[in-house]
């Protein structure tokens, strides 16, 4: 996906994932899970991750209540991490956070997550945009 998304396309990606979020279902009992919430927003989610034999994400899901930004960002994050290892996800999250903070980053692995490029203009929304990724990373650290 090109990094040169216009504002309208960014909004469309976010709204598509808000209205029809990917992987939104209750984590299964055999999944690594993490509960995440926010003191500054309504976000309150549980993320679930299942690893394959090589330690890569075989499945990832989430459920809970969250704002538009958190819903869309978590939807995208759960898609981006499938098939990836902890190291790959940490690198992906590093690029994502750099983008949110207005620093240099590699847009190539971010896919639709580049729709959040302007989210960092409202620092209070960075927590919303990262809650899903942070939950995924928390699950993976439990699995180490």
Image: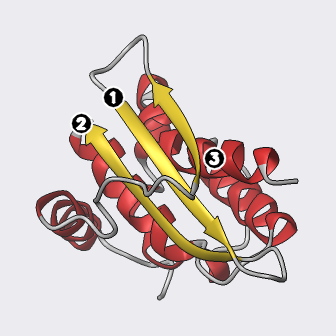
Residue drawn at point x = 76 percent, y = 55 percent? 94
Could you tell whether 106 is left or right of 68 in the image? Answer: right
Label of residue 67 in the image: 2
Residue bearing the label numbered 3: 102
Q: How is the image coloured?
A: secondary structure
Residue drawn at point x = 26 percent, y = 70 percent? 13
Observer-nearest of 85 and 13: 85
> Tags 3 and 1 in contact by the CB under 8 Å rule?
no
Residue bearing the label numbered 1: 43
Can residue 82 be seen in the rendering of this structure?
yes
Residue drawn at point x = 72 percent, y = 80 percent? 52
* Image mark count: 3
Q: Farthest residue in the top direction?
A: 39
Say what secondary structure mark 1 lies in. loop
Say what secondary structure mark 2 lies in. loop
Observer-nearest of 42 and 143: 143
Residue drawn at point x = 69 percent, y = 42 percent? 138
């Amino acid at each position: 996906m090109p990094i040169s998304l216009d504002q309208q396309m960014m909004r469309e990606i976010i709204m598509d994932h808000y209205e029809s979020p990917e992987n939104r279902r209750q984590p299964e009992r055999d999944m690594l899970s993490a509960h995440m919430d926010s003191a500054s927003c309504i976000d309150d989610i549980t993320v679930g991750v299942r690893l394959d034999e090589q330690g890569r994400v075989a499945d990832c899901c989430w459920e809970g209540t969250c704002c538009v930004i958190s819903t869309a960002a978590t939807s995208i994050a759960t898609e981006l991490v499938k098939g990836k290892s902890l190291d790959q996800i940490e690198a992906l999250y590093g690029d994502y956070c750099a983008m949110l903070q207005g620093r240099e980053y590699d847009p190539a692995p971010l896919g639709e997550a580049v729709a959040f490029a302007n989210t960092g203009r409202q620092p209070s929304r960075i927590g919303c945009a990262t809650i899903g990724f942070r939950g995924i990373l928390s699950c993976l650290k439990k699995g180490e």
